[in-house]
Image: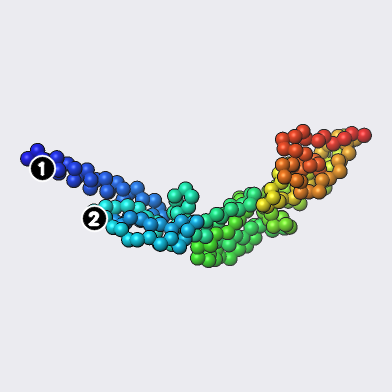
Amino acid sequence: MEKFNLLLVCVIFYVSFLEIDVLACGSDEEPTDCAPCDQHCDNVTRACPMFCMVNSTLCRCKTGFVRDSNNACILPSQCNQTCGINETPVTCPPCDGTCNNTKPICFGPICFGNQTFCACKSGYVRDSNRNCMPISQCNRTCDSIKCSPGQVCKMLFPPCPFNPNNPIPCQPIPTCLPGNSTIVKPCNMLCVRGDVCINGRCVPTPGPIPIPATQ
């Protein structure tokens, strides 16, 4: 009788374990009674023998999904998906604004299967080079600000890190300076690796911020 009770406890524990395992499957996973043989981003044509186990429940990726390097189930189109600075991945073609039209009227969304696209983050728009820039920098010129008495407005370049994969030109912004300040010679907008464009000069990162020379 004691052996029977022990066996019954083991069966109940095993069934409970299986139920917990089923609940543990992720949102893009599903339970299976066969050994999972998920495709991976680096091997989407993986072939596996079918090996099933009686009364066993495991988790596998849902149809159309593959495993990434973090063992998560994702769409094949999301494998190695990288977006540029100030961009974020989306599943439908983006309808990014521009400085001339920060809130365009977009039709859709029109999505295409399992494709992934890159859109500007919230608060950013596309510039003339198709890079994402802050809306706050749109159409900013010295005519748009009023400096304190004794100051003059100069167009200076803010810090602009160099990214070889997605270079972003430095956007000059209006800055109030003492009336006797002169602007330094602008850099070529795109600094070499490891440098940043600050106040029109390419300087090492980290490095001193050049101060406009005074007359």
Mark 1 surroundings within 10 Å by alpha-carbon count, few (fewer than 14), some (14 through 19), many (20 or more):
few
Q: Are marks 1 and 2 in contact (CB under 8 Å)?
A: no
Mark 2 surroundings within 10 Å by alpha-carbon count, few (fewer than 14), some (14 through 19), many (20 or more):
few
Instruction: Kindly report the distance in space between the C-alpha atoms of the residues bearing marks 1 and 2.
Output: 22 Å
Q: Is residue 2 left or right of residue 133?
A: left
Using the rendered image of the protein, determine whether residue 170 is visible from the camera's viewpoint.
yes
* Residue 49 or residue 112, whichever sits in front: 49
Using the rendered image of the protein, determine whether residue 151 is visible from the camera's viewpoint.
no
Q: Quadrant of residue 51?
A: bottom left
Q: Position of residue 136 (x, y in %)?
A: 70, 47
In this picture the colour scheme is rainbow
Q: Is residue 23 left or right of residue 197?
A: left
* Residue 200 or residue 203, whichever sits in front: 203
Q: Sequence-wise, which precedes: disc 1 or disc 2?
A: 1
Q: Position of residue 159 (x, y in %)?
A: 73, 41
Q: Position of residue 27 (x, y in %)?
A: 40, 53
Q: Amino acid at mark 2?
A: Val
Residue at the disc numbered 1: 4
Residue at the disc numbered 2: 54
Q: Quadrant of residue 30?
A: bottom left
Q: Residue at x 77, y 33 (%)?
A: 208
* Residue 119 or residue 166, whichever sits in front: 166
Q: Is residue 86 left or right of residue 8?
A: right
Q: Amino acid at mark 1?
A: Phe
Does 182 appear above or below 76? above
Q: Residue at x 79, y 42 (%)?
A: 202
In the rendered image, which quarter contains the N terminus? top left
Q: Residue at x 34, y 48 (%)?
A: 24
